[in-house]
Image (spheres, rainbow, N blue to C red):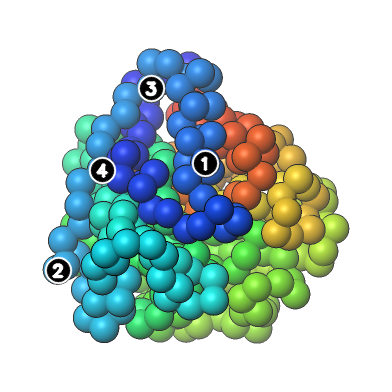
Amino acid sequence: MNERALLAFTHPACLQHATGPDHPERPQRLEAVLQALQVSHPRLEWRQAPRATREQLLRAHTPALLDQALATVAEGLIALDPDTMASPGSAEAALRAAGAGIEAVDAVIDGSIRRVFCAVRPPGHHATVDAVMGFCLLNNIAIAARHAIDVHGLSRVAIVDFDVHHGNGTQAIFEHDPRVLYASSHQSPLYPGTGAENETGCGNVHNVALHANADGTAFRAAWRTRLLPALDAFTPQLLLISAGFDAHRRDPLAQLQLDADDFSWITRELVAIADRHAAGRIVSMLEGGYDLQALAECSVAHVDALLQPAERH
């Protein structure tokens, strides 16, 4: 295992996004991930995420959303929607989280590294073009995808989302853009209530809804028979992963029954596709996962799989 084959981004500001003592999307989530990876991969190279610029954010969001998501909070907590909180440290955390994805795309496209894991918060995949929601201020993965297309000129960018909640914001941003494929497995019914299998965009959206208590066998079957073939056929030039680990059986916000081996398996499958079509280029960004033990274990399993040697095809 060559830990130099993977780069990791984070930033201390991501720990300063306060959400309140009883909120599931809390700083301890990121602390658990960072501690677990530092123990399991002590030689992993970490870099501090830069701030995203307003120009970069406007590729995925309206000015009104940026004004809301990045508004100055003098003290305490402000509810931006029933689930999404902002505090004095939130704007800086959001800018660093989005900046991590942008910098990671630059790194894999210029060839200096093949795979990047962004250990950041707040998560992003529920934020739409014009609305913060579901713990998400900015849609980090969408901003990264737009950067890959608009700055680097890519024409086939795939976004894979195995968070237990459907990435409604990501789907909405790209459902009319054939340059981006969006593939998601998620529990249904569950927040946010989107992700039906008849939601297909312009032919670029692929959803598989899993019932409560579905296990790893059902999850793997969904990807093996439906989502991975669609991804393979798309022949992506870059693979972006919304890496949510809340489909784990221990997670308090959902009822799927996955374990760390299932996340290792899907990551290995995605690595194989990236090796076939995208010169191995993968950028993975942390999304959900609210049981600290499960989140730590799954993040380690995910990074282990990202570090596997390139396959020959």
**In the rendered image, the vertical position of residue 187 relative to residue 111, given as above or below:** below
* Residue annotated with mark 1: 28
* Residue 287 percent location from the top left of the image: 50, 54
Lower sequence index among marks 4 and 1: 1
User: CA separation, marks 4 and 3?
Assistant: 15 Å
* Residue annotated with mark 4: 49
Circle 2 — which element? Answer: helix
Hey, what amino acid is under mark 3?
Leu
**In the rendered image, the vertical position of residue 121 relative to residue 300, given as above or below:** below
* Residue annotated with mark 3: 44
Say which residue appears at 54% left-offset and 76% top-offset: 82
Hey, what amino acid is under mark 2?
Glu
Circle 1 — which element? Answer: helix
Q: Nearer the viewer, mark 4 or mark 1?
A: 1
User: CA separation, marks 1 and 3?
Assistant: 21 Å
Q: Specify few, some or many for label 3: CA neighbours under 10 Å numbering under 14, 14-19, or 20 or more.
A: some
Lower sequence index among marks 2 and 1: 1
- Badge number at residue 284: none
**Nearest the camera: 107 or 273?**
107
- Badge number at residue 55: 2
Say which residue appears at 62% left-offset and 40% top-offset: 292
Q: Are marks 4 and 1 in contact (CB under 8 Å)?
A: no
Residue 177 relative to residue 272: left or right: left
Lower sequence index among marks 2 and 3: 3
User: CA separation, marks 2 and 3?
Assistant: 31 Å
Lower sequence index among marks 4 and 3: 3
**Nearest the camera: 244 or 202?**
244
Q: Specify few, some or many for label 2: CA neighbours under 10 Å numbering under 14, 14-19, or 20 or more.
A: few
User: CA separation, marks 2 and 1?
Assistant: 31 Å
Say which residue appears at 45% left-offset and 73% top-offset: 79
Q: Quadrant of residue 10?
A: top left
